[in-house]
Amino acid sequence: MTTRSKSDKCPSTLTCIEICAGAGGQALGLEWAGFEALAHVEYDPHACATLRLNRPKWNVIEGDVRNFSAKEFKGVDLLAGGVPCPPFSVAGKQLGSNDERDLFPEALRLVAECRPKAVMLENVRGFLDAIFFDYRMNLKKQLKKLGYDAHWYPLNASDYGVPQLRPRVVVVAIREDLSKGFQAPIPLSDGAFPKTVGETLVDLMAANGWEGAFQWAKNANEIAPTLVGGSKKHGGADLGPTRARMAWASLGVNGKSLAEFAPPKGFKDIPRLTLRMTARIQGFPDEWQFSGGKTASYRQIGNAFPPPVAKAVAMRIKEAITLAVESSKSKTAG
């Protein structure tokens, strides 16, 4: 592996390394925001295969992040990651630091090793629950010791053009000498609201000639509930537990399983979603392919950070870094 590092010079393309990369949702958002990835670290072999399938030139490092060292990437512009959610989710029993899947400590270790200009870590909204107040304060304290100004921002994917609610939290830490220019991500302006489930999927539902697709789309006139069902502990490829399935049922979707294909001509039942449909609802472009069987692929989709949301946050980070470096250059020139 070629070692690459960056000084405080700010080129048009900034660099990043990503941990817990998954199927590439955050990686795509970073790419769209203009970041060049030097490494993507991911444990799941199916997700690694997905990354390699779509971006053969990416440096995909397959393995446990606990065994990854960021020292050779010292001076990278951004360290990003979607650290595991179960330690902070209700479904994961909210064990926080007592959960072996808690990788925030590993993220802190990597920050210390590579000293990036900024850090971006995504997690579930449960991270903001009162039970984790001390955990958050300790995280902020540790980042402060390393020289970063850290904040967390609750986000709904639907505010950034993704056709589902999907509440999330993004922790952003900017190096203190660069932090003044950072602004929180701003939802899209009026007139740019996400499409409904029907508007998003009607062409896919009609792809095999189903005559009822357009009437179905008219009735599916809300944004999607949050995609769930991506956990390895909860069965196969379905749209989640009873409450989630009921929400999908109100939109005319059978959430008990995923379909291999769109409904055919003469279809009279309640349609199921295909993998491609769930990927589109998650904000992936249609050309993004997933490696592995239906269950493995859906787990990758269900656990993903929607690319448009990742882009929105990454753009703010890029703006802050660029502004600070350009301001420094002006002062030096003056």
Image (cartoon, helix red, strand yellow):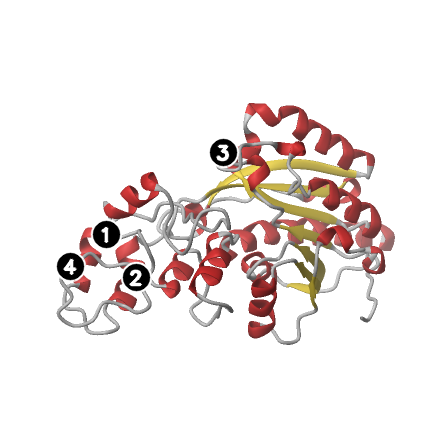
Q: Mark 1 — residue?
A: 220
Residue 4 against residue 53 in the figure, above or below: above
Judged from the image, the secondary structure of the residue bearing numbered disc 3 is: loop
Q: Position of residue 177 (x, y in %)?
A: 79, 42
Q: Mark 2 — residue?
A: 201
Residue 249 against residue 260 in the figure, above or below: above
**Which badge, 2 or 4, comes first in the chain's sequence?**
2
At label 2, counting other C-alpha atoms closer than 10 Å, the crowd grade (few under 14, some 14-19, many 20 or more) is many
Position of 220 with respect to 57 (left or right) is left
Q: Tags 2 and 1 in contact by the CB under 8 Å rule? A: yes
Alpha-carbon distance for marks 2 and 1? Answer: 10 Å
Mark 2 or mark 3, whichever is nearer to me:
3
Q: Mark 4 — residue?
A: 215
State the residue at coordinates (71%, 58%).
Answer: 17
Judged from the image, the secondary structure of the residue bearing numbered disc 2 is: helix
Alpha-carbon distance for marks 1 and 4? Answer: 9 Å
Query: Looking at the rendering, in which quadrant would you find the N terminus?
Result: bottom right
